Amino acid sequence: MFAHTDMAAREYYVFTGPEAGEKNDAIANIREQTRKRLGDVSEYRYYASDVDVSYLVAQLQNATLFEPALFITVRNAETIKSKNDIELLVNWAKSTADSANTLILISEENGIDKKLEAACASDHKKIFWEMFENRKSQWVESYFRKNGFSVTSDAVEQILDMIENNTDSLRSECSRFFFCFEKGHTVTCDDVDKILSHNREENAFTLFDAMADGSRSSSQRFETSIEILDKIKSASKSGYLIALIAGLVYCFRQLRTWHTIHANGAHPTDVQLKTAGFSGKKKQEQYAKAAKVWNAGATSSILALLASTDGSIRETSELDENIMAMCIYSIVIKNGLFPAKYEQEI
């Protein structure tokens, strides 16, 4: 997909957008091509908030005898804002010096700093958009078929209602059926209930549902949300909060989209809803319910709060559970406002 061009050109890529599965597949493909071309490479994975850009550029410029080729990925690249940091990266990217090193800047947003994008060759950057609704259904059906199963159309819709709509999440969750049934089995809605609903672990999406349950008081929603957070913690490895925040960001971005398509009293058609990512009545009901809890302004505040919380958790390892609890408190009790101080309810 991303062909290697002139050996003197920088192996510099910018991959953005919400579709994590296809993005990760593209990165894996480049990694494999690099190893075939150069032999073994030294791989480094960073988050933009955790790495000093001057160190990163020095690392790219100074390959050693022990590391003849580097393959570096930097996630959350949208947070690279410093003028000096951007200048360092742009100068490296535009340098004509021969180098086997590869740098891939990655973001779940649709873009990063314009100068960083402009310094990247057009065939080395791509926005990985979330799949259209018909592609999601086709992807699920094809995935089951390739693994020797079939699946009913109702079951496909139910799966898409329950799982974050990127191919990484779909691949992980759908593969659970292959351990529970013999090849040739047709997966039905009852099977989905048994495998995904009854045995489903708590995660960002069940947490979002609990926080958005407008039939309960804010204090009840907060209490349930903290219980879910504790369950997620007990079943997870270190670093789980970053993935949890990413899942919540996805949910609230979807809520922001819901508010946008319903702005000024608009009544989108089923086709428009599905095109915007709201396939199936269950998902539409879920976001209609959430929209009554958080209006458009609150949703924007919550997204800013989640971004701030992500940064705070990356900076410390001692109080991260407390920071996350305060984030949930702010979402549920304060509609996304930053609390001035720890309040008595905590």
Image: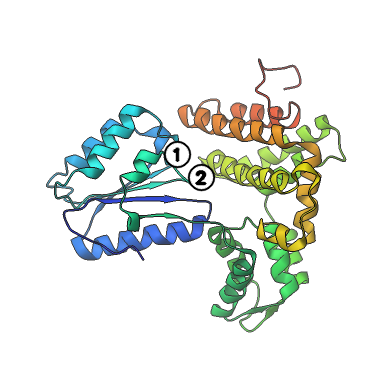
Q: Amino acid at mark 2?
A: Glu
Callout 1, which amino acid? Glu
Circle 1 is placed at which residue position? 78
Residue 70 shown left or right of residue 124 in the figure: left
Q: Name the foreground residue: 275 vs 228.
A: 275
Q: Mark 2 and 1 residues: CB-CB less than 8 Å, in contact?
A: yes
Q: Secondary structure at mark 1?
A: helix
Q: Position of residue 54 (x, y in %)?
A: 27, 31
Residue 120, position as x, y percentages in the image: 32, 48
Quarter of the image for residue 115 reads top left
What is the quadrant of residue 335 in the picture? top right
Residue 131 vertical placement versus 95 (above, below): below
**Where does residue 238 sit, x and y in percent of width and height?**
51, 40
Q: Is residue 13 left or right of residue 234?
A: left
Q: Circle 2 sits on which residue?
A: 109
Q: What whole-number distance in Å separates the C-alpha atoms at marks 2 and 1? A: 7 Å
* Up-down relation of residue 282 to residue 333 (above or below): below
- The residue lying at 35 percent from left, 63 percent from top is 29
SS at mark 2 in the image: loop
For the image, the number of numbered tags is 2
Q: Quadrant of residue 333?
A: top right
Specify the quadrant that holds the N terminus: bottom left
